[in-house]
Amino acid sequence: MRAARGGGTAAAAPPIGALLRWFARAARPLPWRTRRTPYRVTVAEFVLQQTRVETAAPYFRRFVRRFPSWRALARAPRSEVLKAWEGLGYYARARRLHELARRLVRDHRGRLPADPERLRDFPGMGPYVAAAVASLAFGAPVPAVDGNVRRVVSRLLARDVTDDEGREILAGWMAGRPAGRFNEAMMELGALVCRRRKPACGVCPLRRGCRAFAAGDPVAWPSPRRRRRPPRILVGAAVTIDGRGRVLVARRRDGDMLGGLWEFPGGKVEPGESVTRCIRRELMEELGLEVEVGPEAARVRHDYSHFGIDLRAHWCRPLRGVPRPIGCAAVRWIRPADRGRLAFSRADLRVWEALERAPAAGQREGASPQQPRAARIASSTCPGEAPRGTAARRRSARPGSTSVPAVS
Ligand code: SF4
């Protein structure tokens, strides 16, 4: 049965010594736990936001190999940083990390301040990331409260706690302990033992001080939140091939979600509009290009945190006009073999993969709208991105370059 709720923030400390001893034994050998520097700690915290550890680890390794220091990251062009982040989702993280590096190098001689309050002034440094970096990189005694940690505290006290309450309670529990290790141990416990659906109370080092365990119903806390079903958006995209077998791609504007990434141009299908009509309209609005829309080339179902998209990519052939960046940052004809030089969102990577798996409809032979092959692709999940074209359509058109440089 569920225990009564209530109680203030004064809370008896659970056996923190047992937690730290458990962490010394059970901590996973993750790449950011070796050679801890402020730079590596910060990159790890950015990579890990909304991302599973197994997914984040290879990205982290590649990223710090490619950009081993604040200076190396600050020097890199934005396109290279986005390319290193390609497929990880939440591209705003990459842009903010890059901006952070540039500000640090320009204004602070490449040195991150240890004070969590000063850290908060930098891009991407919310309360959790600032506290995690300050404690893990500099030992500052400040609790880091993310969803996992809040869940552990809620269960230990058998009541819902807010982030602010959690910080206050944890500040008392961590007093006199090594702050970085304490925070990491709480995070690790939330990830490995006090899991959302199946807490492994039998092996938990905090079992002795846990009220939810004593109440016999640990998953009752925190209170479940009612989730609304995210809306689905139908999106049309053009796989436009020119007479030389090149594919037309567009780069999203920096200020937009997925800003700086390349995509197959297209946009949201309006009510009552067909996909083919949408593609014709979007290409005219965004690129000033009239196209003939042919059969479906690929289909991608992609889920983000607040919505999902059903992306229908169609073969297209240019009819009239020279593509120019009216509703996007840039436009290019690229050879399919060169697509690896540009950073695409995960949904667009799925389209590329589908095209590569469907050589009969292949672009190199000079595909035409008459070629009948549709590739269906497995669903993917990548939280926090925006459907193409929706932001662009809200902006007024502006004149752009009429040249279309090829990647070569
Ligand atoms: S005893 Fe169970 S509910 Fe309590 S903190 Fe440990 S794993 Fe979580």
Image: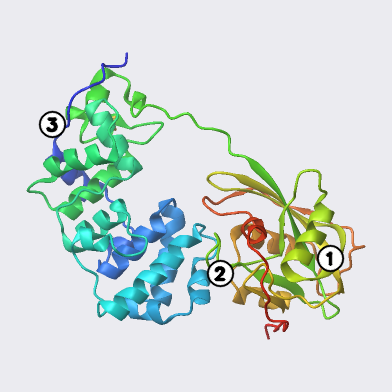
Relative to 378, is 196 on the left or the right?
left
Q: What element carries label 3?
A: loop
Q: Can you identify the residue that label 2 sits on?
A: 260
Residue 401, image x and y in percent?
A: 68, 81
**Gap between marks 3 and 2 measured at Cα:** 48 Å
Relative to 136, is 66 on the left or the right?
right
Relative to 133, is 51 on the left or the right?
right
Q: Verify CB contact (< 8 Å) between mark 3 and mark 2.
A: no
The residue positioned 64% from the left and 61% from the top of the image is 392
198 up-or-down from 128: above or below: above
What amino acid type is highlighted by mark number 2?
A: Gly
Q: Residues within 10 Å of mark 1 (few under 14, many from 20)?
A: many
The tag earlier along the polypeptide, 3 or 2, is 3
Q: How crowded is mark 2: few (under 14 residues within 10 Å), some or many (20 or more)?
A: many
Please state, as top left, top right, bottom left or bottom right, where the C terminus lies in the image. Answer: bottom right
What amino acid type is highlighted by mark number 3?
A: Ala
Q: Can you identify the residue that label 1 sits on?
A: 316
What amino acid type is highlighted by mark number 1?
A: Cys
Q: Can you identify the residue that label 3 sits on?
A: 10
Which residue is at the far top?
Answer: 1
